[in-house]
Amino acid sequence: MSGQTEFRGPEAPAAKDTENAAEQERLTVESSGQDTDRIQDEMPVLPEGPELDRARLVNATIEAGVDPIEMRFAQINSTYPPEPIAYRTFTYLNSVSTGVTGPEVYAAETDPTEEGINLARWNITHALRAARQMELAGRKIQYVTARCPWEMCLRDDLYDIVKGLAKEQGLSPETICLEFPSGLMRAADPESRARIRKSILDMKLLKVRTMVTGIGTADISPAALFEIPVDTFLLDPAITSMSDSRSKGANVAALVNFLKSFSADVIADGVYNDNQINALTKCDCRAYIPSSGYQGKVKHGSLRMRLEEAAAQHAEEE
């Protein structure tokens, strides 16, 4: 600014505030999903059969007032104090023919395909936008996750994909965390592990975090733990549920400490009560995600918040 303040009736808004408001409006419009042509291009193709008219279904879904593809958010709380430090995202595909389809349904078929890569691009783009919108709303968080197929790490272009999408949006890639399913840690052959290791190290160059889910119940290669330096392990809810158990709590704590020995954070998914939060705090588990059945003193937001809900969370809700 020039240092001179111009008044025309009421005090003129600061240029920075105006720019932020304009940027927030742009990001909101770009994330709202009402551009029919863009949505048709972005929508991944599920195995519904070649006889279905893709454009007709997208148009019909929009006309029904529903976004064909949308991202929802769950807060990741630090164990102490129990307040949001990040958000985990879930991408839902909505259709008048198939209803609401979540990643737990479509991932097995889309992940190994080019459509899975395209959906991951969409996830990364919208995670970047969401992180920026939260920043503009005054929220101080570490990152927003973007779910990706682990097969992306076998490619040679993950670095270019993430860097290119961030540049395209004019946003910093440091605000996102790529979330991979446990298959990332099951690579049995040395060549695959070497490729995955390179991709994860490339993300570190971009200061992009990486996370692996399903820890504790999935079959994971011990060699992968030593060779693939991910930043965060997400405990499966079945493991989290035992954290306050008299007979098994010590085993959960030992698992957390073992995972932390790889210089990684550990997050517990599916916390049910405050005793589990206390137990996880004692073993220095970094954070947790509440279960839908949580009962305790901490007030959490919805497990599948819309972006505007997540960005508008107040301190008393945190």
Image (tube, helix red, strand yellow):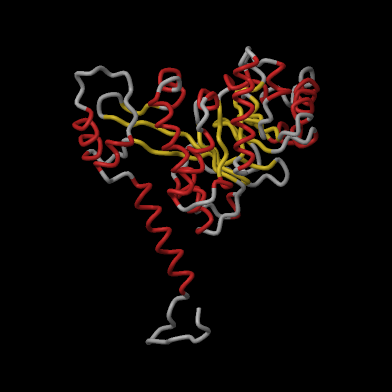
In the depicted view, which residue is nearer to us: 66 or 103? 103
Quarter-wise, where is residue 40 in the image? top left
Q: Position of residue 105 (x, y in %)?
A: 42, 21
Q: Is residue 237 left or right of residue 264?
A: left
Q: Residue at the spot x=59%, y=22% of the render? A: 184
Q: Is residue 48 above or below residue 316?
A: above
Q: Is residue 26 above or below residue 18?
A: above
Q: Residue at the spot x=21%, y=22% of the render? A: 52
Q: Is residue 118 left or right of residue 3?
A: left
Q: Position of residue 197 (x, y in %)?
A: 64, 27
How many marks overall? Answer: 0
Q: Residue at the spot x=62%, y=24% of the render? A: 236
Q: Residue at the spot x=71%, y=31% of the render? A: 276
Q: Position of residue 178 (x, y in %)?
A: 55, 35
Q: Is residue 218 above or below residue 88?
A: above
Quarter-wise, where is residue 254 in the image? top right
Q: Is residue 117 left or right of residue 254?
A: left
In the depicted view, which residue is nearer to us: 89 or 302? 89
In the depicted view, which residue is nearer to us: 239 or 136? 136
In the depicted view, which residue is nearer to us: 103 or 148? 148
Q: Position of residue 81 (x, y in %)?
A: 71, 47
